[in-house]
Image: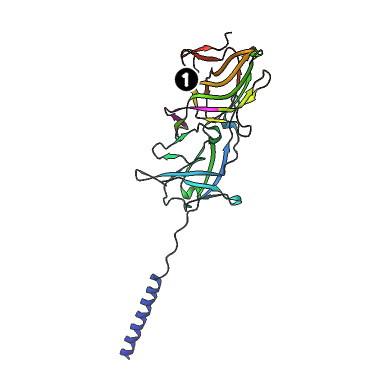
Amino acid sequence: MKKLKLISLMLAATTMTACSSDDNDATPQRPEVRALSFEVSETPYEKPGESRRITRAAIASSLDKFYLNYVYLLGSEPQTNGSSMETTKDGEKGWKVGDGNTGWPDTGNTVDWYACSEDVTFNTSGPYINFSVDETASKQKDLLVATASGTYMGTKGKLSFVFNHVCSALCFNVKKAKNLADYTLTVSEVKLCNVASQGDYYFSTSSWMLGVTKSNYTLYSGAGLTLGTESFVLLGDSKAPYLFLLPQTLTAWSGAGAPANTYLELTCVINKGGEVHNGKAYIPFGAVLEKGYEYDVNINIGKNSLYKLYNGNGTKIIPS
């Protein structure tokens, strides 16, 4: 009897070991997918004289995609996603992050998120982005940015982005001044010259640091506009009338010496009976441009504003 009892105990022990082994061989559970979702709106441009943006309600976003970057600290070292993640509108489903990047980074720390409407260079120090404005108006892109911050537990993976315009938008209109009523004025090209076109936008201060690069922007180039004195004529495409520029102070050329600072360059024909001027004309132009503002620029071309170059110096085309 004692021998049988011993065998029974050994069988029980073997059975218990086998059960334990089955538990260890179980298939591991898949890690939790820390999904991202988005709530997106934008603040519209303001016009000078309107209430400040803080009083303006955000509207449904016009964006169909944006580019996403994040930064969080691991110890004292900033961690980021590397290249920007393209996020596109996915019909009624909302927004979808491409390139296989679909989740919140694997950290319980606070993550700072930075979104831009264009695929620009993102720098973690600052952080800031570098942006250049194309000289060809038809190729220009407006720049909108948004930020969000939080932990995954606190946000449940949902980011609320309110995009803001960080460029200035200018709509240029021209007509002939009444003091040129006796002259025929035909314009074939208009350029805005000597304007800063490259800069760094810092998210922490919502401000620009302009670079040294200056560019000339073509506002109109065509067969020719013969201007009258009654109505302003739009320079540019009526479907996309705005020239986007970096916010800056434009100091007008003084009219003395060769054109410098900021000015308009016109290729035009001005005549009264016989030819008076056929070639380049220059108009001093100054302005203070703020981010998030749109400006209607009405240029009244007259005797007092038109200069030409004579022996390298500015001189009035038509003496007053």
Badge 1: residue crowd in 10 Å (few <14, some 14–19, many ≥20):
some
The residue furthest top is: 320
Q: Amino acid at mark 1?
A: Asn
- The residue shown at (53%, 14%) is 307
Q: Picture coordinates of residue 66 (x, y %)? A: 52, 43
Q: Which residues are magenta?
A: 207-218
Asked which quadrant contains residue 168, the reply is top right
Question: From the viewer's perspective, is residue 233 above or below residue 133?
Answer: above
Locate residue 58, reporting x and y percent.
59, 37
Query: Residue at coordinates 42% horizontally, 65% vertically from top-left?
Result: 28
Q: Which residue is mark 1?
A: 261
Q: Position of residue 134 (x, y in %)?
A: 50, 33
Q: Residue at x 40, y 71 (%)?
A: 23
Q: Residue furthest toward the front? A: 274
Quadrant where the N terminus sits is bottom left
- Height in image: 303 above or below 202? above
- Report the coloring of the rendering: rainbow
Indicate the position of residue 191 as horizontal and vertical percent values: 54, 25
Q: Is residue 117 left or right of residue 20?
A: right
Task: Inspect the magenta stretch and tell me whether residue 217 lies in it.
Answer: yes
Relative depth, front residue between 12 and 42: 42
User: Which quadrant, please, contains the C terminus?
Assistant: top right
Compared with 280, 87 (above or below) is below
Q: Nearer the viewer, residue 190 or 57?
A: 190
Give the overall secondary structure of the magenta segment: strand
Badge 1 marks a residue whose secondary structure is loop
